[in-house]
Image (cartoon, coloured by chain):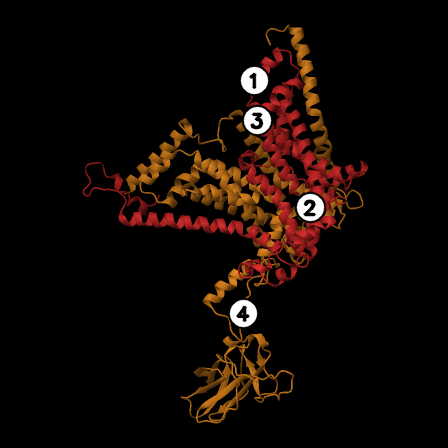
Amino acid sequence: MSLLSASEIPELIPAGTAVRPVVGPSPLRRLATRFGAGAARALVVVIGAFWLFPTFGLFMASLRGTADNSATGWWTVFTAPSQLTLDNYAALLGNERILGSMWNTVLITVPSTLLVLGLGALGAYALVWIRFPGRDVLFAVVVALTVVPAQVAIIPDAAVFQALHIFGAIPAVVAFHVAFGLPFAIFLLRGYFQGIPADLIEAARADGAGELRIFARLVLPLSWPGLGSLAIFQFLWVWNDLLVALVFGFNNPPITYAIREQMRAFSSNIDVIAPGSFIAMAVPLLIFFAFQRHFTRILLAGALR
Amino acid sequence: MKRATSFGTRRIATERLLVAMLFLAPAAIVVGVLVGYPMVVTLWLSLHDANGSFVGAANYARMFSIDETRHAITNNIIWVVVAPTLVTALGLLLAVLTERIRWSTALRTILFMPMAISFLAVGVSFRLVYDENPQRGALNAALVAVHDAFKPPSKYYGAAPRDGTGLVASDGGYETAAPVPVGEPVAMPLVGLPRNRVPSDAQWAGPLAAGTELRGVVWLDFTRGGDGAAGSIDAGEVGLPGVRVEAVRDGQVVATAVTDGQGRFSFPDLTEGDYTVRLAATNFTEPFRGLTWLGPELVTPAVIGVYIWVWAGFAMLLISAGLAGLPRDVIEAARVDGASDWQVLRRVTVPLMRPILIVVLVTLSINVLKIFDLLYVLPPDSSQDEANVLAVEMYRVSFGGGLDYGLGSALAVLLFLLILPAMLFTIRYRRRREFAPERPVGGRAAPRGGGALSRWRSVVRRRRAEEEGES
């Protein structure tokens, strides 16, 4: 620290020898602190507004007609609330391509999540509770695979899916998501499974329970918080994906793909894009607010993915 | 396992191995077929051209010579240097800020919310925010409002003198082609001003009589229907109020005046000589319309801004978790020693938080290198080339019309190589944490007691002693 700040440390004078007793921070300092607290509070409000602004703007735009959206910004609804209309959403209900793509998103997301949970849990169980040679190396491989970019696999996988005659269809998208979701799932569930007391497993084994039985009756019920967190994470990951859908899902496009298609003529298709994106983000947002603790926990654990 | 015989132990071990293999098989097959094997094929393909003939390292040489791919590589480097640093710095500041505020939970939720939204929806939201037209784009609307508050826009931009009426352009304004004598009214007819920009207080310019001083009139020389005569003040043609007029002699501005409601101006002090009359350039400056955020020049910073918006909450959360585990008394000790907030942050908090900050930086670097959706969605087609990054270029080359699997694979391998250091860090970090699962995120700085605490106590003590020596 500099000489400058060192000269401002009155506490260094040994107790009892101070010429002028120090009773506390000076009034000026106190004023600065109080002002600082007020400023910090104001700053927090400004930051919060700043972070809500774009999403709120999208919502407002989804409630305005195309003509209004191309003439003025969404904030004009505060002076002219008559612009607000549900027409875009009503029209969306008649838009088969968008509705179909929403259904595709569900058809992709649900099986991907369930498969990742099931296969991941089985694998993690073996890694934690069964001793076998090469276990540590296998774990290192799993960890390494958690950060592998999808790009290194998409070209050969296109050929694999073509050979299986599922290129462009939902099974291909699901398979790819499962393959890239599994390493992280195994890594995460392994942590949860390790938290189960070893005595419990050994006791079950001594009672003659088979591994599958221990897995299904003991380990899975005991680690439901981990499974739940993983389910939420995987669900959001797949729901929000665009890249995998673009490469492998062109015949059954999910909602992200369908909206991206509309964006080629952004301002004239805003009546589809804005409500479509808002509905597409409403599901993740609901999950986020309902299971916020799970979500933050898994993101903390999943740092480095 | 003491109770089993040695034969039984072996039998159980074999059985367990079999079960382990059965349990691992489904995941191993899926990952092996769709991740492991493709990685090898990608490496192999990267050594071949689009037609499948072996070309050695030619694709790797090519990606540095083609403009698009080279640009993508450069952009990726900019991204990976700038974005994680800014996000981490902002996350640290936000974590420190929210630590002291009572209702910080609400703010943390709000800051964290973008993490749940797809980059597609984020891209759509920010297309609206970044819209170039200040009438529609929120950011430009705000910028223009602030700009105009300090520097009001000129009233008559776009207006120009009618041709053949003796006025010529000069430095953005307009002036008489030759000096005019005092007394004779100077006619300054303008056209090209849309009706809706004519001030509401503008009155008929009317005929202007000669006088003793330099005088004249600025009017909109346009009659609806087009039956007005050029250069004359017809019925219904209004004067333009508030125009700044300068009298110029020998290149020097000697007097200025502002037109009244009828567009008339006079220089009462100038009663003799010839002057050039000039309509100042400030009357005609184009209004500020904000910035072209998603244009070629600004697109990368603009998209990085969006990335920060999405990930700041994540960095904040991770850092907050670390802050909560910091030894309170070390920070208190620094405060008691009279260190300011900033000094505490820089000298105590950041050094203690180093392991966590590194984890955040590495996580974000991996994420930034892989970034695809945001750059595929947010920049409009016209600036896609400028905004390009490796993941997007890899997709465009291989699938988006290019169908050059060789170059695409080479780009994928490059992407993998760029991520490799972070991957090695991840393996080391995760295996280390595995052996000490009770350690908090970051692997150091145990909350209570512990070696880290006493070590940092001694650091702070030593620093205090040094300062004592200095003063």
Mark in front: 2 vs 1: 2
What's under tag 4, amino acid-wise? Pro
Looking at the rendered structure, the secondary structure element under dot 1 is helix
Between discs 2 and 1, the one toward the N terminus: 1
Mark in front: 2 vs 3: 2
Q: Are marks 4 and 3 in contact (CB under 8 Å)?
A: no
Viewer can see residue A97: yes
Q: Residue B287 — which label?
A: 4
Classify mark 4: residues with Cα within 10 Å, few (<14), some (14-19) or many (20+): some
Looking at the rendered structure, the secondary structure element under dot 4 is loop
| Image position, residue B235 (x, y; %) | 57, 88
Q: Residue A255 — which label?
A: 2
Chain B as rendered: colour: orange
| Image position, residue B105 (x, y; %) | 47, 41
Q: Which residue is mark 3?
A: A192
Looking at the rendered structure, the secondary structure element under dot 3 is helix
Between the C-alphas of marks 2 and 3, the distance is 33 Å
Establish whether labels 2 and 3 are both on one chain: yes
| Image position, residue A174 (x, y; %) | 71, 37
What's under tag 3, amino acid-wise? Tyr
> What's the chain of the residue with tag 2?
A
Between the C-alphas of marks 1 and 4, the distance is 73 Å
Viewer can see residue B71: no
Q: Residue A243 lies in what quarter of the image?
A: top right
| Image position, residue B211 (x, y; %) | 45, 93
Vertical arrangement, residue A65 with respect to residue B44, above or below: below
